[in-house]
Structures are given as C-alpha cells and as structure tokens.
Amino acid sequence: MSAVGVVESLMKLATVVTDAAASNTKNGKFDFSSFLQGGAPAEITSAVSSIVGALTPNDIQDAINTVNAKQKALLDGKSLSELSTDKLVQYSALTDTKLTLSTALVKQAEKADFFLWLQNGGLGDLMKIAQVVIPLLI
Amino acid sequence: MSYVAKPLTIAVVILVLSGCCATLRNAVSAYGTVAAEQAQEMNGLLKRCVSEKSLAKRAEACNGLETSIDAYRKSAIQLEGAASANTGGSQK
C-alpha cells in the first residue's frame, strides 16, 4: 500500500470510529472494541474488517520509509542547515507525518488503544498532515 | 452478516491489531527516534523564525515551528502510558 493509501485508510478508519462514537456514546464513554464485539451494525464491522485487514503494521512502516526517501530527496546531499526555509518547512512537515504514523504504530501495538487514539485525536492529526503532506508525496 | 461471519470478522480485526510484527517496544523505540529528529528540526526552524531577514520567510518558519510543536505535544500526550514498554514494564 502506498504512503498516501496508508494515510487515507487511517482517515477512513478514524471516520468510522468517530461516527460510531458520535451516535453511541453514553455517559461520555464509548469503547469501540466492545462496540464491535456486541451490537455493532454489520456494515460497520465489515468496513472495519476490510480496512484493518488491509492495513498491516508493515504498511505503516513502509509509509514511514517512503517519507524518509522523500526527505532524503529534499536534502539532495545537503545538511538541514543548508536547506532554504521553504524546504526546511516541507522537511519538517514530513517529520510531523512520520511522528503521527509512528504514533499509529505504537497504538496498533497497544491493541485496543488504537481505536481510542483514532477517536480521540488521531482523525484530527491525520487530517492536518494529509492537507500538507499528501501533495508532497504524490 | 451470519452468526459465523461476524465473530470471524471480529477475530480477524483483533488478530491484525495484535501487531504480530511490530512489538510495542519496537514501536516506542521508533517513535523516540522520530521525536528526536523532530526536536532537531524544530531547533532549525526556531533559528529561521528568529533570524530570517525576509518577513515572509520568517513567518513561514514560525508557522512551521508552531505546527511541529503542536504535533510533538499531541503525540506525546497520546503516548502517555506507553512508556512502560521501554522499561520492561507490562504492556497494556
């Protein structure tokens, strides 16, 4: 899966989780894992299964590697301090993307916390990096 | 969805989320490497934010720095609690 595909898949998953949380939160609490295991509509379990099944930790790591390659191309043999300001800002935006993807990897390894992350901030972070970074990666 | 298909779907989701190839420890270690890299870049952006002669470039550097600080702060908050993985503590 391409780096852009990984960001898009994470955003789709985050949207499903956030939508489910919006309509199923009771007393300020919502646990997507429990929701999946009991009472989730078939279309939600099917959508989540399809996205999660296609998005492995290796895909996220590959996306990080793609961002690394883009950063290396931006450097073009120079050091960071030799980059123009606009290129340094682009370079930094790519590192922000790696940080969000690294957070996704940690949350995926933490199992249930992955959904909680997507629900509580992951979607916002992904939308922010997508606006800046997808044009740089295409 | 049938009575068989739904539990199977949930099992697949849990299995994939268990991250067979990316342990929590490795993931936290990789995160730390990126965080250190970002701190170095923020230092570079801070210098440009202060010293750029062009106002437009200075604003560009300051905005980039602000965005990076925000990303750094948010991810650190989101990973609060995962630190035990680096000290050999129990995983969540």
Image: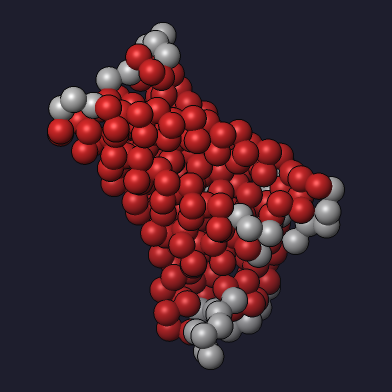
Q: Is residue B87 at least partly visible in the picture?
A: yes
Report x, y in % for residue B48.
30, 28
At 15% from the left and 33% from the top, the residue drawn is B55
| B36, above or below A24, in the image | above
| B66, above or below A28, in the image | above
Report x, y in % for residue A133.
33, 39
| A52, above or below A78, in the image | below
Q: Residue furthest top?
A: A77
Q: Is residue A59 at least partly visible in the picture?
A: no
Report x, y in % for residue A130.
34, 46
At 55% from the left and 58% from the top, the residue drawn is B77
Answer with left or right where residue A61 lies relative to residue A73: right
Answer with left or right where residue A122 lies relative to residue B26: left
Report x, y in % for residue B15.
70, 56
Query: B16 or A80: nearer the eye?
Result: A80
At 64% from the left and 77% from the top, the residue drawn is A34
